[in-house]
Image (cartoon, rainbow, N blue to C red):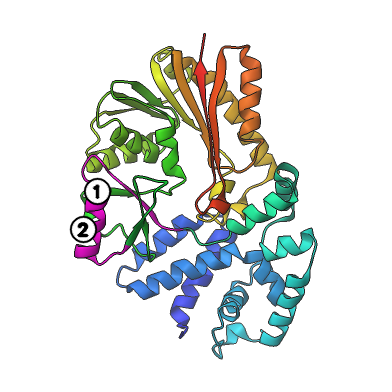
Amino acid sequence: MKLYHNLSEVVAESLHEIFVEKRYADKVIEKVLKQNPKWGARDRRFIAETTYDIVRWYRLFQHLTEAGEHDFWKLLGAWCLWNKITLPDWEEFRGLDPKKFWARQKEVTAMNSPDGTRLRESIPDWLDELGRKELGDTSWEREIHALNETAAVVLRVNTLKTSRENLQRQLEEEENIETETSEIFPDALLLAERQNIFTRQQFKDGLFEVQDAGSQTIAPFVHAQPGHRVIDACAGAGGKTLHLAALLQNKGRILALDTEAWKLEELKKRARRAGASNIETRVIESSKTIKRLENSADRLLLDVPCSGLGVLRRNPDAKWKLSVDFIERVKELQQKILTDYTRMLKTGGEVVYSTCSVLPSENEQQVEKFLAQQKDSFQLVEQKTILPSEGFDGFFMARLKKIK
């Protein structure tokens, strides 16, 4: 593989934005690619994948090259050595010694301690300590290892407009895109090869959305039926809302709520493209918005804000931006949402509490705390955990019934 200096500069600049200016990696990459529309697919892939790889392995690459905190060219050099690419004779790579790099890597591989795990899996000390405390050593090491694997690209077929079989055939015949199906996820198509799928006509026609298979389990878990009034109270841009609309076959009514108006505007655009006509959006402006909807929902989805530790595959920069304090604050918010928003549920109705976290303190323990406070007003019907080691993003979901 030949390295080009201009593209390497873009990677170094992107890393500066992510680590120094504290911008989100996905937004940085999106902006860079939009600013350079004439780049070919190979160049775009190099920029995106190399930047994400270095973000993912930041701590390890720093250790292997003894790079300074913001020596992004040295980290790019580490990425080249890691991928067996000969380093070009560039000034930026002076002082990088491949023999020393691999000697240090051998030492890291041999380290049988938490310090070894922290370097091998490239995670901050506090995160390793928290993971071990909550999941235990063996389970945590398995899950954090899985979270460093590259995420699969998964499509959710929009069954309002097509079937999985038809879309799979169409993508192969018209676009030369190979996909695989899964017996476990009935609406999912897994791309055989990573590529920019958003430029395809099938996406523009609303035949699919990009949504991880783990995420695709949440809407069916709500058990909404045609005719139900469903409230998705933390709807965001509406990935799960749209899935609910498809499962309801555009029958019944879905009310999508969020505190951010711009997210709901995005949901409206996506709903038009998907042909989802049973969705109404409403901004949560204050507690009065919730109070007006008291006892009105047959089904309630609370896909609450969380640490996002279950989706580190897709957002590897989160491990460098998260903190223990943030996770403690988000747990307080989760409990507040559970307590305040469940008043929207009718007696006999059911609420699904879900997160994209692997931490029991955000998941089972939050449900237990809520049930203890409710004094027999709710009962647990079912709960489910999808672990990253099963191949997709990590999610937790619990369904509770309001009994009085």
The reply, left or right, for residue 162 in relation to residue 391 is left
Q: In the depicted view, which residue is nearer to us: 84 or 285?
A: 84
Residue 41's place in the image compared with 264, above or below, is below
Residue 79 x, y percent position in the rendering: 57, 75
Q: Is residue 158 magenta?
A: yes
Residue 333: image quadrant is top right
Please state the extent of the stretch shown in magenta in the rendering.
152-178
Res. 205 visible in picture: yes
Residue 157 x, y percent position in the rendering: 30, 47
Which type of secondary structure does the marked residue at label 2 adopt?
helix
Which residue does the image show at 67% across and 46% down from the upper left? Answer: 323
Q: Give the mark nearer the N terminus: 1 vs 2.
A: 2
Label 1 with label 2: CB-CB less than 8 Å: yes
Q: Which residue is mark 2?
A: 170
- Which residue in the rendered view is the most extreme toward the front? 183
Mark number displayed over residue 207: 1
Residue 196: image quadrant is bottom left
Q: Which residue type does callout 1 highlight?
A: Leu
Q: Which residue type does callout 2 highlight?
A: Gln
Mark number displayed over residue 166: none
Q: In the depicted view, which residue is nearer to us: 261 or 384?
A: 384
Separation (CA) of disc 1 from disc 2: 10 Å
Q: Please state which of the two labelled residues, at mark 1 or mark 2, is closer to the viewer.
A: 2
